[in-house]
Image (cartoon, grey):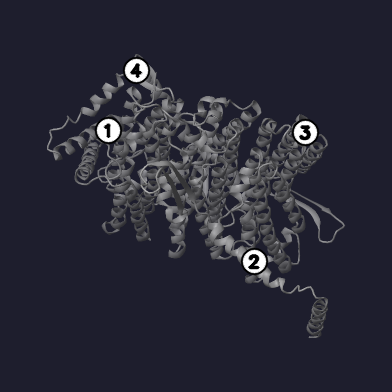
Amino acid sequence: MLNLISTQFSFFLALLFLAIGAIGSLIFAKKDWLANLWGNCLAILASVSGLVAAVKVLFFGETFTYVINSTLPNLSFSFVIDRLSALFIFIISLIALFSSIYALGYVKHFYKKYNLGVLGFFYNIFILGMLLVASAHNIFFFLIVWEIMSLSSYFLVIFENKEKNNIKAGSLYFIMTHVGTAFIMLAFLLLYQATGSLDFGIIKSNIGNASLLTKNLVFIFALIGFGTKAGIIPFHIWLPSAHPAAPTHVSALMSGVMIKTGIYMFIRIFVGILSGTELWWGVLILIIGIFSSMLGVLYALTEHDIKRLLAFHSIENIGIILLGIGSAMIFLSLNLKTMATLSLVAALFHTLNHATFKALLFLGAGSVISQTHTRNMEDYGGLIKYMPQTAFFFLIGSMAISALPPFNGFFSEWLTFQTIFMGIQTQDIFTKSIFILAAVGLAFTGGLAAACFVKAFGVTFLARPRSTEIFQAKEPEFSMRFGMLVLTFATLVLGIFAGSVSKTILGVVNDLTGFQQISGIFFTHRQTFELSNGFAAVSTPTIFVVLSIVLSLIYVLVEILTSRRKVKVGCTWDCGTELEPQMEITSTSFARSIIMIFKGVLKPSKQLEIEYRDANMRYFPTSRNVELGITDVYQYYFYQPLRTLLDRFSGYIKNVQIGILNAYITYVFLILLILLLTQSY
Amino acid sequence: MTLVPILSPLFLGVLRKIKAYFQNRVGASIFQPYRNLWKLFHKDEVISKDASWIFRFAPYLIFTITTILGASIPLFSTLLSTNLLSDFLTIVYLVALSTFFLALAGIDVGCVFGGLGSSREMTLAALTEGGFIFSFLVLAFLAHSTNLFSIASAVSTLPLFSFTPVVLAFISFIIVMLCETAHFPFDNPATHLELTMVHEAMILEYSGKRLALIEWAAANKFLIFLSLGANMFFPWGLTAQADIWQVFLALGVFVVKALILTTFVAVLESSIAKFRFFRLPDLLFTALILSTMAILLIY
């Protein structure tokens, strides 16, 4: 059956479904339930087609190229889906599928408050934009669909426009994404100037002639431009405000998939087109990866807004992916292609894994928020008794993101560690120290992420409720739970079948230029992953099976031996007083120790206000107020000075426009004179 | 597989006996921990009504993990070198899994001290992971493999002058061991003051068979770290043959090595005080730096 449908057909079918979904949602906007059903069901159908197309390319190798020439000069709608695009289309479609299933139930709480037709329209256009970004092959076409993706996500971020914070978040996102797009355009224009063509394929073949300066500039501009979309530090400031502002299923898509389009273009440009020629490129990306991962998780620990916490974890995981890409580029520049393949497999596998468990976590957070109507974790507590299934899904997501075996996060972090270890073993002292730093960073990141998710899961779901809304919470409806259930299953499956998945991803990497027929860095035998030089081996199914068997054995043994003991349900030890919600650990206090240890980086602040009964005596306080905060270093040291500089500069430029007509005529005359003089030479 | 659970309370008993001698007491017999476990398994349990299935499930998982770890590390032989669970990163992350669930169980009952203990435990666990991974990394680079059995057989054949990195890594590992097994200067396993507890605070609400499982798991963890320290860094005495006398000899050597380390921990616990909590990260970073220096010494 699969043989009858070609890749081309299913891909364009997906695009068609999304277009119909978008327009249909607008048409049916008056009837909430119809707009919801239409928009999301067509997105589901489109995601299934996208999955089919991606699977056909990845497993059957049916890559496709399609060009529609337009009448406008230099613009041709050329699509090329090779294995790398197919992997990203797979990730996009997978997450879009489950987000849309989730959205069927989730958007019901927007009925009568917001326009669901607009939501369906921009949602479908957003997925359309992402699918096109992964397949575009012409510079202008790429820029057009990149804009489509950014603009539709902007409108989705400000969808709940009655909250002022969402509008502010949207504006920041809008500005940052366009700053990024400007740098991307600069990079692309340089590429066009160096190779004379707008097609990625032709650029790839001609780029060898370009000067080193051009390549370096393209690297810097592309790093800043795509890095802004990916959310690397210090261009990440839009991420923590934009992801919480959007509706949950959109946040899942943005955080799990949209920032990966930045990674997709990193691999396309740095590894595909530029072929990673300079050593310092890889070192720079590795250093950015180290900073992004460590700072991401440290800032996540300071958060008590559950969605902001998850957004910072996206920054952390992008850092881990960049560790893989940076190592790959270092190895490429030294022509160690076998080792570079391992790094790229690690980075791409982590991309896939992060998309799955981040979407799962966001959907879980969204279910909690929809029941409790607050994002503040300090108001949660005890939800495991009211929403047991959601709690279980969130627990699996937390375990996956903390890289605990046997889930998928463990395997991709293991792979990233192995590639960094290879770097330590084989490189000279300078690169070796960078790799050692990377290993230190990754080790700390893993531990701190586990701490952060103990906090997130524990404060949200365990212990007693901290506010009265919790008592009204109940399980969300079936479609929301179904979306989360399948994603949970996916994290386990990806973890256990990691061997097969890494083989498929190896096929993706082999498809990139210069990597053909590079294999033998690792081999997988019945899901046991082993490095070829015998350095390391891991088998996630063994871990899973052994854990389950021994656990059941011990449980049965203990139950049999202690069957006559009784279990009494009593009260938690309360030291003789009443048990109050204030007695439980809060998310702020849980992380306070870590914040104090890293206070050089996080710069925490504490403000204490005490009101006394008698101002002179200052002995009996009537009220105490403590405010704990974190300085926003990026705003303070980077963006604010930049903005002040820009303001001052514009102030000087303003003096040119004095308003006197004679001055303007003088300007025109001077410019003409200069142009004529320069032309004559 | 059952060797570690059977032997571990004995080493705990020896540790307490030596500390008792330092305190000029006779102390309980070295078999007292066995009696404690027997007593706890025969008691009824009281579980808080705020506790969820995580509280009920965690002790089984933690005990399972320590049993599995006990079976995956070389105790007295290098015969099982194809054991797929013996990759050191897998070991580190399995330990992290047990800490994760223990911390969750501490928060689950909504007790004041449980939350405090979980917060401190996760802070220390996050910082210890670096030193833990790096101390084994030194050995892995020397042995060109991350499999613990291969490391053990390779380190035993190293020439003498390449032992400096091993010694540095061993010091770093000792610091990590003291942290993970909740001994001085990180945590006082015999304290009754809840505000100074780290590990004990998380298990305050446990009783009966679940408490027995958790205490047994803690003893297992102690023995696991002792064997890792003894057999990874000083692997002489491990047998490579299946001959019955060799196995007994290797077991004897293992017990002696572990007892030496136990004595060291006991002497340390009797001589120094527990550090203030915010001095502990300095110690953990020192462990990391020592291992990093060891790595730089190798190449």
Mark 3, other Cα within 10 Å: few <14 / some 14–19 / many ≥20: many
* Disc marking residue A35: 3
Residue A620, percent from left and from top: 37, 42
Amino acid type for the residue under numbered disc 1: Ser
Mark 1, other Cα within 10 Å: few <14 / some 14–19 / many ≥20: many
Q: Mark 2 or mark 4, which is nearer to you?
A: 2
Residue under pointer 4: A562
Distance in Å between CA atoms under marks 3 and 4: 58 Å
Give the answer, above or below, for where B208 lies relative to A95.
above
Instruction: Tell me which corner region of the image, top left, top right, bottom left or bottom right, holds residue B263.
Output: top left
Q: Mark 4 or mark 1, which is nearer to you?
A: 4
Residue under pointer 2: A646
Distance in Å between CA atoms under marks 2 and 3: 44 Å
Q: Quadrant of the N terminus of chain A?
A: top right
Asked whether disc 2 touches disc 4, contact meaning CB atoms under 8 Å apart, the reply is no
Secondary structure under tag 3 reads helix
Distance in Å between CA atoms under marks 4 and 1: 21 Å
* Disc marking residue B58: none
Chain of the residue displaying label 4: A
Residue A132, percent from left and from top: 74, 48
Amino acid type for the residue under numbered disc 3: Ala
Distance in Å between CA atoms under marks 2 and 4: 74 Å
Chain of the residue displaying label 2: A
